[in-house]
Image (cartoon, rainbow, N blue to C red):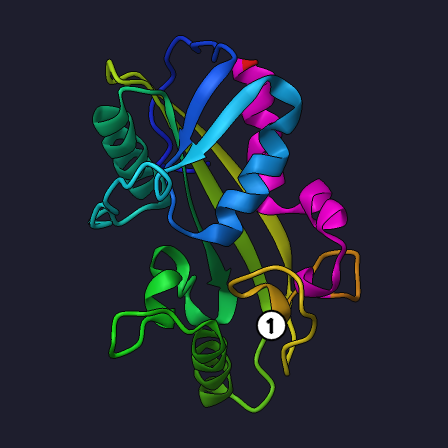
Amino acid sequence: MNLDLPGPQAVRKLAPGRLVIASHNEGKVREIRTLLTPYGIEPVSAKELDLPEPVETGTTFFANAELKARSAADLSGLPALADDSGLCVEALGGDPGVFTANWAETADGSRDWNLAMCKVEDALTAITPAPSRDAHFVCVLALAWPDGHVEWFEGRADGTLTWPPRGAVGFGYDPVFVPEGDTRTYAELDPAEKHAISHRADAFRQLVAAVF
C-alpha cells in the first residue's frame, strides 16, 4: 500500500482539446505526446507556452506532480498533466528517488545525466564490491484542471541496473536500467517497446481507463 496516495474522489473525464504537458524536459514531453496521440488531445508543453518551472518542494512523487500540474493549469487556464518520476535503487534505500533529477545537477544549473549515472554507480560500489542492483522506476501523473480538481495515477517498472551505460535512445537513467524480463536497457529498446512496458506507460494505462 502506498501511504502517499491521496484519498479517493469522483473521477472527472477529460474532454478532447488542448492539454498542457507541465514539463520542460523534452524527453518526457516527447513520450507523453506519443501516448496521448490516440485520444483526440492537443498537447502543448509548458515550455511552448513560456510557463515557468515551479520549484519542486514536495517530498513525494505525488506532491511534486500535483504542484507542477496545478501551477500549469492555473497559469494557462487549461487542464494540465504533470509527471514526477524517478529511479529508486533498493541498495541505496530508495535513492535517488524523488531527488532523481537533483543527482544530475551541475554547478552551472544544467543537468548532466552521465554525471547522475556515475553518482549512482559510485554510491553502489561504495557499499560493497557486489551490491544488489535491484531497482525500479516510479511515475506519478497528476492531471489538474483550472478549478483545482486533480486526479493521480501511479505506475512502476521493476528491473536491475547495469554498468557501463548502454544504448543511445531514451533519456535520463535509461542507459543503465534493464527492465524485468529483458536483457536490454531502456536506451536500447525501440521507443514503441519502451512505451509498452515503462513506468510512464503503466501510469498512462490507468489514466486512460479512468478519464477517457
Q: Is residue 127 above or below residue 87?
A: below
Q: Is residue 66 above or below residue 194?
A: above
Q: Residue 133 placed where, x, y %?
A: 60, 72
Q: Is residue 154 above or below residue 16?
A: below
Disc 1 residue crowd, few under 14, some 14–19, many 20+, Cα 10 Å: some
The residues colored magenta run 185-211
Q: Quadrant of residue 21?
A: top left
Q: Is residue 203 magenta?
A: yes
Q: Residue at x 49, y 29 (%)?
A: 43
Q: Quadrant of residue 12?
A: top left
Q: Is residue 76 magenta?
A: no
Is 103 displayed left or right of 43 in the figure? Answer: left
Q: Residue 5 placed where, x, y %?
A: 38, 32
Q: Residue at x 34, y 27 (%)?
A: 6
Is 192 displayed left or right of 21 in the figure? Answer: right
Between 86 and 17, the one nearer to me in the picture: 17
Q: Residue at x 67, y 60 (%)?
A: 186
Question: Which is the main secondary structure of the residues drawn in magenta?
Answer: helix
Residue of label 1: 133
